């Protein structure tokens, strides 16, 4: 295709919205000639399904739940006045609480004011807040952010060592809808123990974001937490960034939460239009459908040419893959749907995996994100005559885009003026709705996650087996046993899992389990004992 042909196609497919400050180019997706006309009935059905969702239709029959994250930035759309009041009241409470913390009206037990935030959460309770904190953070932020986003003890130790004695001026925000999420529970208990080691009351340094009446809610009341904010059952974790989940840490950090909400609200208006060519979320969903054949045949590579968007691909991994990765469609047919997401940032990728994107297997499509404003104009600096570092960054983006097109690779380009709170809200809302539209196009439920629940149940089964393993070894204290012998004593035929459990326990001193293995012998010949 010649440059003239590419430009004609660019003119035909470019979407631009001056109010949003956003452009979307899907011209480098190889749509079939009749693609848009053929897909229009499905797209209109997707618009209707989305309208029903926003009106309060049950979206997750598995749990009899509605999906109302769109109401968070347009409370007037909520189907009941009680929900509207709850949303509006919560935003006001968050803003007021953050102001009280910043002005030291809410203060720690021994320090003069809270200077840091430790957020404890996992999945949607951490990915969104981390992305926003990094995208909008500045050295002048009101509070410095830290995160526990896993149950890795070493990871938590690293964070606590970074905080050090400043834990006395750290406000911990624990985020868990049910309060039963083990990773978050573990992180909370680890943090609580660290506060106690410093002679501090955990409750006087803690905030809960959770469901009313949850395990965490009850614990927070018992411990006298500084504040509690709601998580509603109609907001899923991966779409919770603009609820108290994301707004509480963002407000404490000193970010413009109303700007984020306004941006998301504006994007919702634009992506609610039932006019396909004038709806950026619809265009994204259709581009994904065309690129993947509607069957997830290609991966989504996200390349933001802006350091502030480094964590966006991690945020999208959950939003896209948890929403679209489904075994069955709405009719119960086995379809194994999904789109894999990965990414880093430009131009780092020029020195990483772009070589494969250009010349390797054609199993992907790229989303470039271009930010027009490089930096504060007062800091303009030329690295060559009339050439800045930002010019190089843009040159690498355009060059990579062209190189991929020449190699027959497909891409989408999203362009924005600058990174600010309003744009971050727009970006979150754009992809939330694009995921919803795509799910309708491929006839799946984007709002349940049976695979995640299966993984949790399997993990709990391993921990229950571990309890039997330890009990069996205690009963024969001091006796050296093979994994097979421990499995028999534990009443299981799953020797492999017993072996993995034993090896982990023995590797951690203080657990009471020892491992003996002859030099040069296979690990499977090891013997384990208690004491």
Image: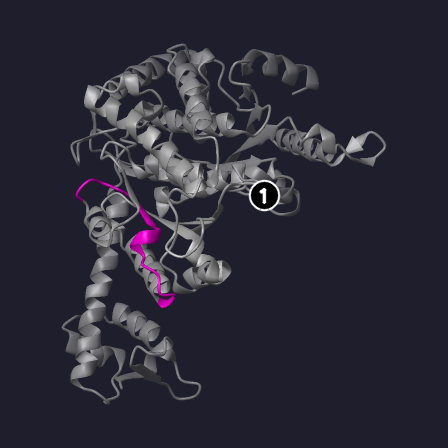
In the shown orientation, is residue 286 left or right of residue 353?
Answer: left
Compared with residue 21, is residue 132 higher up or lower down, i.e. above or below?
A: below
Q: Which colour scheme is used?
A: one colour
At x 67%, y 31%, the residue is 374
List x then y, in percent, for residue 397: 65, 32
Which residue bears the numbered disc 1?
139
Q: Give the range drawn in magenta.
A: 197-213
Report whether residue 120 is seen: no
Looking at the rendered image, the quarter that the N terminus falls into is top right
* Depth order, front residue of 47/111: 111
In the shown orientation, is residue 471 left or right of residue 115?
Answer: left
Q: Residue furthest right?
A: 385
* Depth order, front residue of 465/298: 465
Looking at the rendered image, the quarter that the C terminus falls into is bottom left
At x 22%, y 59%, the residue is 460
List x then y, in percent, for residue 319: 38, 36
Residue 9, picture quadrant: top right
* Depth order, front residue of 417/223: 223
* Depth order, front residue of 406/216: 216
Report whether residue 357 is seen: yes
Is-magenta flag for residue 206? yes
Compared with residue 183, is residue 512 higher up or lower down, i.e. above or below?
A: below
Compared with residue 198, is residue 383 higher up or lower down, i.e. above or below?
A: above
List x then y, in percent, for residue 295: 38, 32
Residue 198, picture quadrant: bottom left
List x then y, in percent, for residue 304: 57, 35
Residue 328, picture quadrant: top left
Is-magenta flag for residue 350? no
At x 16%, y 32%, the residue is 64
For label 1, count other residues whose C-alpha is less than 10 Å away and answer few (under 14), some (14-19) or many (20+). few
In the shown orientation, is residue 149 left or right of residue 144?
Answer: left
């Amino acid at each position: 295709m010649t440059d003239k042909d590419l430009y004609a196609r660019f003119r035909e497919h470019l979407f631009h919205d001056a109010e949003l400050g956003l452009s979307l180019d899907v011209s480098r997706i190889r749509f079939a000639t009749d693609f848009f006309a053929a897909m229009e009935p499905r797209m209109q059905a997707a618009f209707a399904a989305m309208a029903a969702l926003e009106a309060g239709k049950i979206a997750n029959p598995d749990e009899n739940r509605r999906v109302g994250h769109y109401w968070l930035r347009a409370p007037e759309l909520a189907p009941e006045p009680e929900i509207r009041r709850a949303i509006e009241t919560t935003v006001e409470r968050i803003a007021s609480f953050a102001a009280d913390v910043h002005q030291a009206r809410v203060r720690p037990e021994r320090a003069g004011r809270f200077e840091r935030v430790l957020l404890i959460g996992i999945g949607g309770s951490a990915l969104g807040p981390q992305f926003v904190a990094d995208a909008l953070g500045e050295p002048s932020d009101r509070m410095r952010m830290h995160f526990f986003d896993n149950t890795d003890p070493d990871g938590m130790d690293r964070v606590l060592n970074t905080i050090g004695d400043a834990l006395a001026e750290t406000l911990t925000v624990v985020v868990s809808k049910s309060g039963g999420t083990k990773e978050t529970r573990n992180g909370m208990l680890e943090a609580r123990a660290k506060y106690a080691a410093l002679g501090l009351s955990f409750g006087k340094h803690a905030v809960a974001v959770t469901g009313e009446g949850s395990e965490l809610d009850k614990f927070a009341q018992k411990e006298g937490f500084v504040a509690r904010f709601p998580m509603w059952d109609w907001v899923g974790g991966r779409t919770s960034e603009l609820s108290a989940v994301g707004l509480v840490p963002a407000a404490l950090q000193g970010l413009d939460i109303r700007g984020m909400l306004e941006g998301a609200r504006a994007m919702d208006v634009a992506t609610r239009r039932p006019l396909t060519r004038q709806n950026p979320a619809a265009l994204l969903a259709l581009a994904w459908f065309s690129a993947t054949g509607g069957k997830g045949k290609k991966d989504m590579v996200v390349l933001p040419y802006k350091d502030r968007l480094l964590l966006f691909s991690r945020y999208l991994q959950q939003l896209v893959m948890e929403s679209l990765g489904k075994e069955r469609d709405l009719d119960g047919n086995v379809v194994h749907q999904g789109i894999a997401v990965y990414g880093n940032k430009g131009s780092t990728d020029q020195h990483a995996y772009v070589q494969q994107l250009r010349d390797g297997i054609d199993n992907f499509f790229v989303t470039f994100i271009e930010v027009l404003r490089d930096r504060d104009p007062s800091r303009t600096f030329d690295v060559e005559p009339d050439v800045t570092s930002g010019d190089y960054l843009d040159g690498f983006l355009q060059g990579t885009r062209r190189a991929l097109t020449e190699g027959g690779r497909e891409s989408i380009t999203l362009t924005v003026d600058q990174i600010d709170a309003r744009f971050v809200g727009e970006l979150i809302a754009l992809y939330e709705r694009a995921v919803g539209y795509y799910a309708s196009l491929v006839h799946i439920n984007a709002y349940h996650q049976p695979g995640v629940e299966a993984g949790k149940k399997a993990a709990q089964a391993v921990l229950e087996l571990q309890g039997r393993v330890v009990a069996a070894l205690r009963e024969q204290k001091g006796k050296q046993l093979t994994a097979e012998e421990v499995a028999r004593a534990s009443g299981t035929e799953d020797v492999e899992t017993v072996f993995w459990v034993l090896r982990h326990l023995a590797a951690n001193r203080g657990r009471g389990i020892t491992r003996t293995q002859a030099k040069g012998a296979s690990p499977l010949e090891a013997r384990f004992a208690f004491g």
